[in-house]
Image (cartoon, rainbow, N blue to C red):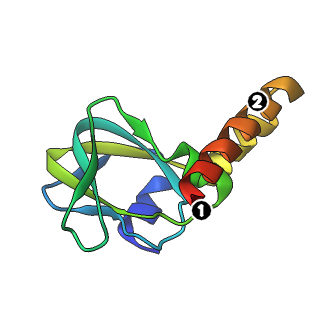
């Protein structure tokens, strides 16, 4: 268990510094990420191209985590700040407690995103 996985169990903010890797391509998508302060760049496996940038208040990784996918790129923290990670198990427990119509909508949206990423 790496430090990110360990600290995600407590759901406390994780202090981050420039260049820390949150996840790498090919790793299982186990946690949804919320950026409290700072910036995260999603970059290609080879580090050659930035695909997307998330900043303060951004939440990402829901479709990947819900569908049990592996990360297709790498997430690197920029600057100084903090993130909170929400484990898949917690998300699935929350979804399971929802009314059936809400659960079905979430599953449907997640599967559409999963199919889109597969193409």
Assess disc 1: are there few (<14), some (14-19) or many (≥20) residues with their C-alpha within 10 Å of its C-alpha.
some
Secondary structure under badge 1? loop
**Left or right of residue 35: residue 85:** right
Lower sequence index among marks 2 and 1: 1
| Vertical comparison of 45 with 96: above or below | below
Quadrant of residue 28 in the image? bottom right
Q: CA distance from mark 2 to mark 1?
A: 19 Å
Q: Nearer the viewer, residue 43 or 118?
A: 118
Disc ID at residue 1? none
Residue 69 image position (x, y, % from top left): 59, 62
Whether 43 is drawn above or below 12: the answer is below
- Report the disc number at residue 105: 2
- Give the label on residue 69, or none: 1
The answer to whether one can see residue 93 in this image is yes
Identify the residue at horizontal 76%, vertical 30% (top origin): 105
Circle 2 crowding by C-alpha within 10 Å: few under 14, some 14–19, many from 20? few
């Amino acid at each position: 268990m790496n430090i990110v996985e360990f600290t995600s169990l407590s759901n406390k903010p994780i202090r981050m510094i420039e260049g820390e890797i949150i996840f790498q391509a090919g790793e299982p998508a186990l946690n949804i990420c919320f950026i409290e302060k700072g910036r995260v760049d999603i970059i290609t496996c080879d580090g050659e191209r930035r695909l997307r940038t998330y900043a303060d208040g951004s939440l990402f990784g829901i479709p990947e985590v819900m569908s049990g996918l592996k990360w297709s790129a790498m997430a690197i923290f920029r600057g100084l700040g903090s993130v909170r990670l929400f484990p898949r198990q917690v998300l699935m427990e929350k979804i399971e407690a929802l009314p059936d119509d809400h659960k079905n909508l979430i599953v449907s949206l997640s599967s559409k995103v999963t199919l889109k990423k597969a193409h």
